[in-house]
Image (spheres, rainbow, N blue to C red):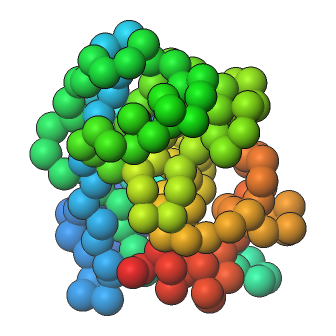
């Protein structure tokens, strides 16, 4: 009995994989996007944290969260090691600074602050544009959702007027749904 309780405690603490595949091995229909992740020298990010955020983003996209949602066969994964850059001051405060950030290498860029994203807006959590890269701040809330949402913008997705959608204008715990067209964009 003591051994069974120890095993149960271990399973509850460590979790069980949903099946026998290693976490990074996907079925053949899953589209994998390898993303170069970088951070400004005034903040920090490591491979393990970037991997956890990308795994959270992937889970949000892959799970069917009920009515009006599709399970999207896509994975966001890190390409190479997370790297540091020192261009700028770690804050985006103007169109010129945003454009300079878009020219830097990397698909996802972590900065201290975003105060300009198409217009002057104080303290935005993320910003991206179609065909560009993602710029995010080190917010502790909804990081996977934030990275998924902003990556959706790089795929041409706009905000959607549905309070449960990944592409809703604001972040929130219940905002996890994708429609079929959004999933198709994520898979391109």
Question: In the figure, is residue 53 to the left or right of 163?
Answer: left
**Which image quarter: residue 110?**
top left
> Residue 130, position in %: x, y?
50, 64
x and y, in percent, of residue 61 in the image? 53, 68
Q: Quadrant of residue 33?
A: bottom left
Residue 97 picture location, percent across and down? 48, 29
Q: In this orientation, does residue 3 appear?
A: no
- State the residue at coordinates (51%, 85%): 184
Residue in the image at 38% along x and 10% along y:
42
Quadrant including the C terminus: bottom left
Q: Is residue 110 visible?
A: yes
The quarter of the image holding the N terminus is top left
At horizontal 59% and vertical 28% (from top left) the residue drawn is: 94
Residue 4 drawn at (x, y percent)? 38, 46
Residue at the far front in the pictured view: 96
Q: Is residue 102 above or below residue 45?
A: below
């Amino acid at each position: 009995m003591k051994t069974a309780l120890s095993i149960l405690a271990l399973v509850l603490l460590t979790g069980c994989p949903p099946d026998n595949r290693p976490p990074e091995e996907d079925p053949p229909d899953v589209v994998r996007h390898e993303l170069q992740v970088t951070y400004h020298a005034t903040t920090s990010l490591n491979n393990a944290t970037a991997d956890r955020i990308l795994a959270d983003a992937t889970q949000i996209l892959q799970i069917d969260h009920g009515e009006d949602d599709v399970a999207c066969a896509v994975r966001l994964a890190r390409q190479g090691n997370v790297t540091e850059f020192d261009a700028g001051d770690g804050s985006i405060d103007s169109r010129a600074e945003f454009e300079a950030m878009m020219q830097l290498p990397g698909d996802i860029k972590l900065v201290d602050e975003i105060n300009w994203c198409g217009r002057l807006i104080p303290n935005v959590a993320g910003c991206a544009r179609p065909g560009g890269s993602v710029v995010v701040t080190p917010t502790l809330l909804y990081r996977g959702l934030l990275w998924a949402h902003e990556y959706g913008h790089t795929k041409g997705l706009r905000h959607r007027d549905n309070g449960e959608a990944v592409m809703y204008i604001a972040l929130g715990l219940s905002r996890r749904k994708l429609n079929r067209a959004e999933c198709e964009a994520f898979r391109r």
